[in-house]
Image (cartoon, rainbow, N blue to C red):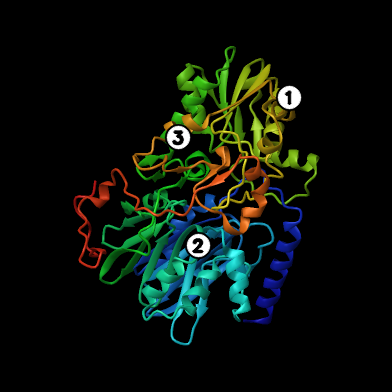
Amino acid sequence: MAIKGIEQQQIAQRLAQKTEKTRVNVRSLNEECGIFGVWGRQDAAQLTYYGLHALQHRGQEGAGIVSNNNGHLWQERGLGLLSDVFRDPARIDALAGTAAIGHVRYATAGSHGVENIQPLMVNFHDMQISLAHNGNLTNAMSLRKDLEEEGAIFQSSSDSEILLHLIRRSKASTFVDKLKEALNIVHGGFAYLLLTPHGLYAALDPHAFRPFVVGQMPEGNYIVTSETAALDVIGARFVRDVQPGELLAIDDNGLTIDSYTRNTALHIDSMEYIYFARPDSTIYGVNVHKARKRMGAALAIEQPVPDADIVVGVPNSSLSAAAGFAEATSLPNEMGLVKNQYIARTFIEPTQDKRERAVRMKLSAVKDVVRDKNVVLVDDSIVRGTTSMFIVRMLKEAGAKSVHVRIASPIFKFPSFYGIDMQTTKELMGANNSLEEMREKIEADSLGFLSVDQLVKAIDLPYDGQGTGLTTAYFDGHYPSPIYDYAASLSNFVAKDLVDFAPEPMTIYHPRQVASLRNEETLADGTIHLDSQTIQGVE
């Protein structure tokens, strides 16, 4: 690398480290990342770029693409938005080849830096491997400690790198068997994409915490990505949801669907439906926009506002819920808040004045809409509560007679450990305050939340197995699996019987209905094979 390039990289790393101490994310809730992979396309890297662009909402602090050019992997990655990282067309041009995987990332605290931007890539003496990961491993700290004591040298602080070390240390005879062995050692939330000179591999954790889907281009090429919205952008058709515990292999012969464990369950993260996923995405047969509308309608019934004049949704993720609330009450659904779509992410000092200014940079109240009105303000969640307070103030300063906050999800009481940047109760308003205390702090005239039961009913997951098929631990304290290295952080809640943990699954998950699985034939070795021709008859 040229000296100038090294200096620029060092400057970027120092800037990232400095801003980490003062970063304030106005939304306060962040998804780890979005991933995309394709095999058998001359424009693989360009197609990956378009797919990642549709997933930009899942991570805005880093992006990267690795391509496979005749068995040689090449990596391009950097800090910033996808469009910033690949602003120079030469970076995409450098990614020649017929297969690629890509990643957009939200960096958790202390993990800024180019070395953590994915896809990660390693060069062994006999092969190259690249990896992209969406989620969070709950036994990462223990595994890393053990690996380091055995001599492993890590190049990043990301838990994603652990899988690469486990693969390499496996004594199994084939790469697939090495990968299966490694996947059975890691725990937590993960959707993995791995690119090798010979194939593209995708694996989902045994609980299916994170969304993961397979699509197919008109020419027959397979796509694996985080959301169906990315398939729509590139003109691919939806084929199937990746199922918990599955291992997919894609090469020139087509798609083979195997599994690395038969002990699986379905616990889709409910926050995907509430906030993270795009409204035009579909997860396990449930359209996100329609689910959010049902949440809003259920909220209107559970938490009515008798004297309301208008409904105002907080842009953008709450607009669907606001529409559902308005329809259920026959109230006007007004654009009382406007979002500045062009503002860059805000890096500011964590002072109240500057936090409020950051909110005002992103949102503006429409005075002529809210003036002299009793406003129902619909939002998807309250985490820290700071943003809610500023928005309520903004509406009242614009002339609103009253502001009644309605949240289209239950109260956040407990942390997430499966891939959301929310691993402590310290800043969770719902964990440390009563409902009335929360109302007072956000300065609302009234405050109401959706119940867990109504949230589950609103999502309406087509599932008839054990449990609800959803993870609602953040609201009710019922974690669907052990949390291993994080267990001590919730010991006080366990002692008070507020939190419990289910064991890892010992049974086989069976979906009630997955349309794309109807015509699949299980082979003698237990796998399913689909050739690279366009699949017919998939509903």
Disc 2 or 3, which lies upstream in sequence?
A: 2
Q: Which residue is mark 1?
A: 397
Q: Kindly indicate the quadrant of the structure image that contains residue 99.
A: bottom left
Query: Residue 130: horizontal and vertical position, in percent?
Result: 47, 72
Q: Amino acid at mark 3?
A: Val
Q: Earlier in the sequence, mark 2 or mark 1?
A: 2
Label pair 2/3, CB-CB below 8 angstroms = no
Separation of disc 2 and disc 3 at Cα? Answer: 27 Å
Residue 345 in view in this figure: no
Among the 4 quarters of the image, the one containing residue 39: bottom left
Whole-angstrom CA distance, mark 2 to mark 1, is: 44 Å
**Amino acid at dot 1:** Glu
Helix or strand or loop: what does disc 1 sit on?
helix
Q: Which residue is mark 2?
A: 133
Mark 2, secondary structure of its residue = strand
Q: x and y percent of residue 166 in the render? A: 50, 74
Residue 336 picture quarter: top right
Dot 1 alpha-carbon crowd within 10 angstroms: few under 14, some 14 to 19, many 20 or more:
some
Crowd rating for badge 3 (residues with CA inside 10 Å; few <14, some 14–19, many 20+): some
Q: Say which of 308 and 299 sits in front.
A: 299
Residue pictured at 42% horizontal, 71% vertical:
181
Please tell me whether mark 3 sits on a helix, a strand or a loop.
Answer: helix
Is residue 242 at least partly visible in the picture? Answer: yes
Q: Residue furthest top?
A: 307
Drawn side of residue 285 relative to residue 302, left or right: left
Q: Is residue 446 left or right of residue 119?
A: right
Q: Residue at x 40, y 69 (%)?
A: 180
Nearer-the-camera pick, 288 or 10: 288
| Label ID, residue 456 | 3
Please tell me which of labels 3 and 1 falls first in the chain: 1
In the image shown, does 537 or 491 lie closer to the viewer? 491
Q: Would you place residue 320 above or below residue 423 in this image?
A: above
